[in-house]
């Protein structure tokens, strides 16, 4: 699976959009980009995933560059409850794929 | 229950003691994973079960670590002769058969502290 690079931390104001970047320059054509988050003292939680096209669900949007070498997770209106570690994972998915998390990016949402 | 349940929530063990950590997956979830998360790090894969079969144990760090799932439901991760470096949060995840990572549900983990 391709390696990902994320800055260690960022913050944003409550109610504003949080844009979390991820670099995955060695991604291969059939690898997906997944985002998970981990709130303090909880297990990781799936957010969203994509292959080439931008994706949106009730939690977030995922923007993948045309060359697929980077992506951005967007939380459109961050709340204090969004304070967490966010993991960008690139993986050749099938059933029962094992995840490689890395250190992730710590997002702090300030009041 | 509605989610993946892990017990105990916290465990303190003296160095050299054996411990057993339990995972109750969501009913019907055939796939079960164990991960280890050291302080300040992301979770790292330990082992994977499909029903009662342990199909991948490549992440187990030593032969002191042993996992089982005898009836294809509840799983136990056992650590023998615990060492300080075993201190970590141990996470369990489960999913329906054939689901990818968008279908994984994680428990809240067991925090093991070896003193």
Image: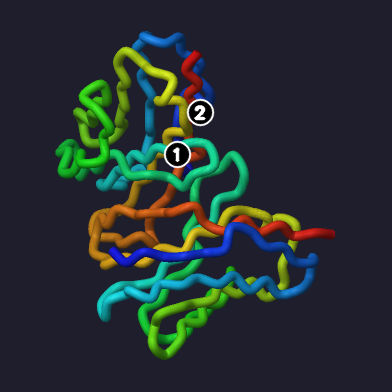
- Chain ID at mark 2: B
Q: Residues within 10 Å of mark 2 (few under 14, many from 20)?
A: many
Task: Tally the marks.
Answer: 2
- Relative to A69, say whether A39 is above or below: above
Rendered residue at 23%/31% (across/down)? B69
Q: Residue A51: x and y, percent?
A: 36, 79
Image disc number at residue B37: 1
Q: Could you say which is closer to the camera, residue B16 or residue A38?
A: B16
- Where residue A9 appears, x then y in whole percent? 63, 59
C-alpha distance separating marks 2 and 1: 9 Å
Residue under pointer 2: B111
Check the image and tell me how it is coloured.
rainbow
Figure quadrant of residue A86: bottom right
Residue A85 versus residue A1 in the image, above or below: above
The residue at the far bottom in this view is A66
Quick check: B94 left or right of B62? right
List the single residue furthest toward the right: A111
* Residue at (50, 28) in percent of width and height: B111
Could you tell me which secondary element the residue under label 2 belongs to?
strand
The chain under label 1 reads B
Residue B25 vs A48, above or below: the answer is above
């Amino acid at each position: 699976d391709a390696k990902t690079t994320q800055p260690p931390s960022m913050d944003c104001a409550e109610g504003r959009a949080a844009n979390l970047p991820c670099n995955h320059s060695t991604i291969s054509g059939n690898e997906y980009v997944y985002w998970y988050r981990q709130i303090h003292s909880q297990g990781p939680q799936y957010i969203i995933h994509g292959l080439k096209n931008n994706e949106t669900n009730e939690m977030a949007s995922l923007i993948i560059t045309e060359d697929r070498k980077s992506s951005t997770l967007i939380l459109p209106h961050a709340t204090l409850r969004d304070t967490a570690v966010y993991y960008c994972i690139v993986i050749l998915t099938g059933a029962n794929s094992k995840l490689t998390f890395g250190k992730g990016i710590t997002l702090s949402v300030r009041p | 229950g509605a989610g993946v349940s892990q017990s105990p929530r916290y465990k303190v063990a003296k160095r050299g003691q054996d411990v057993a950590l339990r995972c109750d997956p969501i009913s019907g979830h055939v796939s079960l994973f164990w991960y280890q998360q050291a302080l300040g790090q992301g979770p790292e894969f330990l082992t994977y079960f499909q029903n009662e079969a342990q199909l991948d144990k490549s992440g187990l760090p030593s032969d002191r670590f042993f996992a089982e799932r005898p009836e294809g439901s509840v799983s136990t991760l056992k650590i023998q002769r615990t060492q300080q470096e075993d201190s970590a949060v141990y996470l369990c995840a489960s999913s329906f058969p054939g689901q990818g990572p968008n279908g994984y549900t994680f428990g809240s983990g067991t925090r093991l502290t070896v003193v």
